[in-house]
């Protein structure tokens, strides 16, 4: 894969008006480079992806993942759809008009639906508690599917086989014991399994302020850490303000975790507008600031690594400034970005997640009223 160059370079951290959700101030000013290069390399949205049955609707897409066969998995929030959208407010109600799709959907790279599972109304199976607000999905090297949730009582991570058969639950709905608990979680946001050790890393998350690691087969606790490798604290950190000294704790949400092949662990500290880098044992290595003037929901929503052997680039989905940043992983510097606010194909409204297949194509998920997944094809 060629390293992506969109030709739109980030220049400084000057405030950009009107680029974030209402009430939020964002940072970053695009600076045009060579237009020919930009046209040649900018990822192009595929408006036909994905394809669903005619009577299905999807709600907020709380997570997206790619498996080793380049299948794309979504976890979406059927209960974020309202009665009007599903036809129930028609007189008489026409429930057959549109039905909420199951929460877990599996597609091939062409957008064909391969499988789906889960109850659109949320369900409780034997031995596990389905989250009230689906958030995050990951498919590991053995084909297991991991899910989480960020509802008020969603303090659990679930493990399923690829066909939806329940395997294991870590944590317990409705029970949390803070950022130094070795057993219970606090609204986990994201997860990834390290194929070398078969350990599960959880960005924990919307209530807690840490990374916590478990054995992915047994669920046994291994270790946890906070920002800069510190012991995490649940003290109120206050609101983020541009120009303030970096705080020594994560702010919630700790929104994403990714593990590179070279052993570096990348964590999205969303509201602090920073990405921190660790060794697998939690030793702090480095950090970078992305769009440092961004207020409100922050700039570092999700992380992904490029598929080349050296994983040259790190990708950051920025759901406040509505773009994907392309970061030189060695230098920890933003090289370029693509995307802008909007509702049309190729634009974003609350981009929440990003993944890349083995060919370098991008797949994105949107929450709030974005409620969609998109594919971006990279020319090679």
Image (cartoon, rainbow, N blue to C red):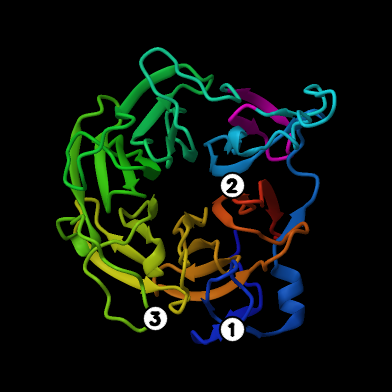
Q: Position of residue 224 (x, y in %)?
A: 20, 47
Q: Is residue 163 left or right of residue 38?
A: left
Task: Give whichever of discs 2 and 3 has the lower sequence position.
Answer: 3
**Quarter where residue 191 is shown:** top left
Residue 95 lies in the magenta-colored region: no
Task: Give whichever of discs 3 and 1 has the lower sequence position.
Answer: 1
Q: Nearer the viewer, mark 2 or mark 3?
A: 3
| Region in magenta | 102-117
Q: Position of residue 83 (x, y in %)?
A: 71, 33
Q: Is residue 360 above or below residue 24?
A: above
Instruction: Report the residue that reaches farthest toward the top.
Output: 126
Q: Residues within 10 Å of mark 3 (few under 14, many from 20)?
A: some
Q: Residue at x 44, y 31 (%)?
A: 131
Whether residues under marks 2 and 1 lie with C-beta atoms below 8 angstroms apart, the answer is no
- Label 3, on which residue? 242
Q: Residues within 10 Å of mark 1 (few under 14, many from 20)?
A: some
Label 2 secondary element: loop
Task: Give whichever of discs 2 and 1 has the lower sequence position.
Answer: 1
Q: Residues within 10 Å of mark 2 (few under 14, many from 20)?
A: some
Label 1 secondary element: loop
- Label 2, on which residue? 357
Residue 260 vs residue 92, the one in the foreground: 92
Please identify the quadrant where the N terminus is shown: bottom right
State the separation of the CA atoms marked 3 and 1: 16 Å
Q: Nearer the viewer, mark 3 or mark 1?
A: 3
State the separation of the CA atoms marked 2 and 3: 35 Å
Q: Position of residue 220 (x, y in %)?
A: 20, 30
**Quarter where residue 233 is shown:** bottom left
- Label 1, on which residue? 29
Instruction: Report the residue that reaches farthest toward the right.
Output: 91
């Amino acid at each position: 894969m060629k390293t992506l160059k969109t030709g739109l370079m980030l220049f400084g951290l000057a405030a950009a008006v009107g680029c974030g959700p209402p009430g939020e101030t964002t940072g970053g000013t695009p600076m045009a480079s060579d237009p020919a290069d930009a046209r040649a390399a900018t990822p192009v949205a595929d408006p036909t992806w994905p394809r669903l049955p005619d009577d299905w609707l999807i709600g907020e897409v709380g997570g997206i993942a790619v498996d080793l066969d380049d299948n794309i998995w979504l976890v979406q929030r059927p209960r974020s759809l309202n009665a009007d959208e599903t036809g129930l407010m028609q007189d008489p109600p026409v429930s057959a008009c549109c039905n909420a799709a199951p929460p877990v959907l599996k597609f091939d790279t062409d957008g064909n639906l391969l499988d789906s599972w889960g109850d659109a109304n949320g369900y409780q199976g034997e031995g596990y508690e389905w989250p009230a607000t689906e958030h995050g999905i990951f498919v590991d090297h053995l084909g297991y599917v991991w899910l989480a949730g960020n509802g008020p009582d969603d303090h659990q991570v679930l493990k399923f086989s690829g066909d939806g058969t329940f395997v294991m639950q870590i944590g317990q709905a409705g029970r949390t014991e803070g950022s130094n608990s070795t057993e219970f979680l606090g609204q986990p946001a994201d997860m990834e399994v390290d194929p070398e050790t078969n350990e599960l890393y959880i960005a924990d998350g919307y209530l807690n302020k840490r990374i916590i690691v478990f054995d992915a087969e047994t669920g046994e606790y291994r270790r946890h850490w906070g920002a800069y490798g510190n012991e995490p604290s649940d003290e109120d950190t206050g609101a983020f303000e541009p120009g303030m000294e970096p705080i020594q704790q994560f702010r919630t949400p700790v929104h994403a975790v990714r593990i590179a092949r070279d052993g570096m662990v990348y964590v999205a500290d969303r509201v602090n507008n920073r990405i921190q880098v660790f060794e697998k044992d939690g030793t702090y290595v480095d950090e970078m600031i992305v769009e440092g003037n961004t207020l409100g929901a922050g700039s570092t929503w999700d992380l992904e690594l490029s598929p080349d052997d050296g994983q040259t680039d790190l990708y950051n989905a920025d759901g406040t400034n509505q773009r994907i940043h392309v970061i030189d992983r060695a230098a920890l510097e933003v090289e370029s970005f693509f995307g802008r606010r909007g509702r049309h194909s190729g634009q974003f409204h609350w981009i929440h997640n990003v993944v890349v297949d083995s060919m370098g194509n991008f797949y994105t998920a949107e929450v709030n009223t974005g409620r969609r997944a998109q594919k971006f094809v990279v020319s090679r």
